[in-house]
Amino acid sequence: MARKSTPFADEALVAGAPWIDALRGDALACYREQGLPTARSEAWKFTNLRRLERIAFAPSPAKGTPVAEIPDGIAALDGAYRAVFVNGRFDAAQSRLGDLPKGVEIGSLAAVDPDLLEPYLGRIADTQVHPLAALNTAYMADGLYMKLADNAVLDAPLHLISIASAGETAQRFHPRHLVVLGENATATLVESHVGAGETFSNTVLEADLGVSAMLNHYKLQNEAPDAFHIAFSQIRLADRASYDGFVLQTGARLARNEVRVQLGDRVECRLNGAYLGRGDQHIDNTTFIDHTAPNSTSREVYKGVLDDRARGVFQGKILVRKDAQKTNGHQLNKTLLLSRGTEMDSKPELEIYADDVKCGHGATTGELEEDALFYLRARGIASAEARAMLVAAFLSDAVAEIQAEQPRAAFQAVVDQWLDATEASTR
Amino acid sequence: MPLLEINGLHATVDGKPILNGIDLVIEAGEVHAIMGPNGSGKSTLAYVLAGREGYEVTAGEIRYDGKDLLEMAADERARAGLFLAFQYPVEIPGVAGTTFLKAALNAIRGHRGESPLDAMQFLKFVREKAGALNITDDMLRRSLNVGFSGGEKKRNEALQMAVLEPKMAILDETDSGLDIDALKLVASGVNALRAPDRSLLVITHYQRLLDYIVPDYVHILADGRIVRSGDKLLAVELEEKGYGAFVGAKAA
């Protein structure tokens, strides 16, 4: 058998409540048993983490919040509540959480009474399927805690700003976020992941939506060029809940965003995304939509543009269990390659055990259409501008999937900025 | 000096010879028609003139407005006033018609040394032209040519021509796929653009279009060569006798 590698597991576990100690111990054992994922594992076939091992990441400080200003590149959300984290630690000074509506609690996970976390923390995410998520569970220290009581409404988006910050020494850390929405509660959560330096953020987010709850959840991964971003989110949707998710990945040296969603009865789930890669970036989107009960709908559209030598990965699995009759599932992955050096690996996977379902999927990868390019140029539009128009057109319906207006505009602005840089570089 | 002068033009597509020595001179203000059977090289000539990649010129030269046309990229040619009305206009989802036309117009205005039009000026200018071609605001706003009928696409080509005001317009089988009402509408749009400083090259299979856009000269193309040239009466003669009478190989 090939040698297993278990880096980043040299820290002592922090002692706390007995159930957390047990959780940490089990998670560490799970990580040690599986080791850092390699290409031999089916789930990691296209994303190689060997480069991570070659960098001497130091664990982020055990106490206190490192100081870092909010860098450029976050989503522009005026009027949003703000929860800022630096290397996974809550930064109260830069957060804006005054005057929260009734029934809404938002703050630092580390500050919450462990008894209140017990029903949720580590109970939502299947961290044993993801060795790095298990590692996160072993060493988690802080993150977002967001809880809405039944019928509570968050009246403005919550903007989670996660800053990954390193100076001379490369830094590693394990942010852990927990989102709990009671019955009929409604919220919008926008994540902006930004930073500077050589960092390895290994994030886990768990979300639990009660009956008829609604969550808009939009994530922007715009980390620094030397950053490694590994994220694992699991979202549990009770009956009649609805979830509108979108992930825009454009930052980091290597990024993998894995989302797992479990759907109850009559759930409306939208899980969409876009990825924009250039240089030597590696961007992985892995999703798992688990239809456990009947009458639910899932829609998944991921679109990406790759330039230079960038590499993209899309792995999208939809599981329709035996009881999930009348499931309606739609999945689409489209990638536009702007340069010969790019590579896209797309792996759609439908696994269906119910007999009365409607499920479809499609995946395409291609270059800009010569016919369209020629048509634009034949009207006097210069080559670089014509290409930019077509790339923008390709992406225009991606961000349009975001249902909430303000985040949609903010994400579109990030896309536009990326497009401007692409156009400038081809002139 | 002629506006367009083609001398001994040979061109291949995928290594296969399509144009085998074309000579054609078009003076400013003239309307020329090129007629020919399928496969005679009509569309190839149009694409070679417009600068499409994949069409290789193996011999001959083309002078346009005093310049070596073959040295110019497709978009340069367009900015210099050469316009191709496509036989099959391309559908481009996600690019609004107005966005496209504004980018094109301002690129060409920039080349002419004119300042770009702002959104309001542009819209006013386009609406005037669009009305005459029965093109609605909704059609302008929609993604370029997406979901348009054959007639709508051709009207849209005519609109682009009216807005971009080319010196030399090439109409590639503009009549194909049009019913008689649409044909009349497009032809009247084209005729409105006839001017002493603007030349037209009308490429068509049928004489019908030439009843509406009356040419000064008619050329018959066969096997990549112009086999006969004449005035507008040649088109009538062709309609009566058929291509067989003019195309040596097929008549034999």
Image (spheres, coloured by chain):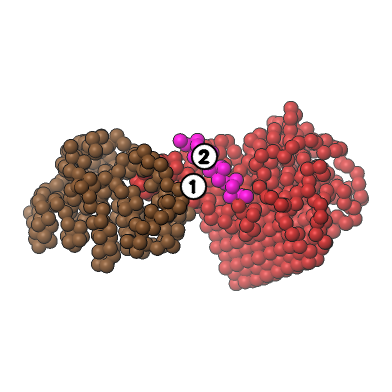
Task: Tell whether A92 sits left or right of A264.
Answer: right
Let me know if marks 2 and 1 both belong to one chain: yes
Nearer-the-camera pick, A378 or B123: B123
Which label's residue is closer to the chain start, 2 or 1?
1
Nearer-the-camera pick, B13 or A92: A92
Q: Which chain is brown?
A: B
Q: Identify the residue at horizontal 34%, vertical 40% (top origin).
A: B112
- Label 2: which residue? A422
Q: Identify the residue at horizontal 29%, vertical 44% (top origin).
A: B82
| Residue type, numbered disc 1 | Val
| Residue type, numbered disc 2 | Thr
Q: Is residue A318 magenta?
A: no
Badge 1, how many Cα within 10 Å: few under 14, some, many 20+?
many
Q: Which residues are magenta?
A: A410-427
Residue B239, placed above or below residue A340: below
Q: Secondary structure at mark 1?
A: helix
What colour denotes chain A? red
Assess whether mark 1 and mark 2 are in contact (beta carbons under 8 angstroms): yes
Q: Identify the residue at horizontal 20%, vertical 44% (top origin).
A: B28
The picture places residue A104, in percent across and down from the top left corner, at: 81, 59
* Structural distance between the alpha carbons of marks 2 and 1: 9 Å
| Disc on res. A391 | 1
Q: Chain of mark 2?
A: A
The picture places residue A264, in percent across and down from the top left corner, at: 71, 66
Question: What is the magenta segment's predominant secondary structure?
Answer: helix
Q: Quadrant of the N terminus of chain A?
A: top right
Q: Do we see residue B199 in this rendering?
A: no
The picture places residue A253, in percent across and down from the top left corner, at: 63, 37
Q: Secondary structure at mark 2?
A: helix
The picture places residue A424, in percent across and down from the top left corner, at: 50, 37
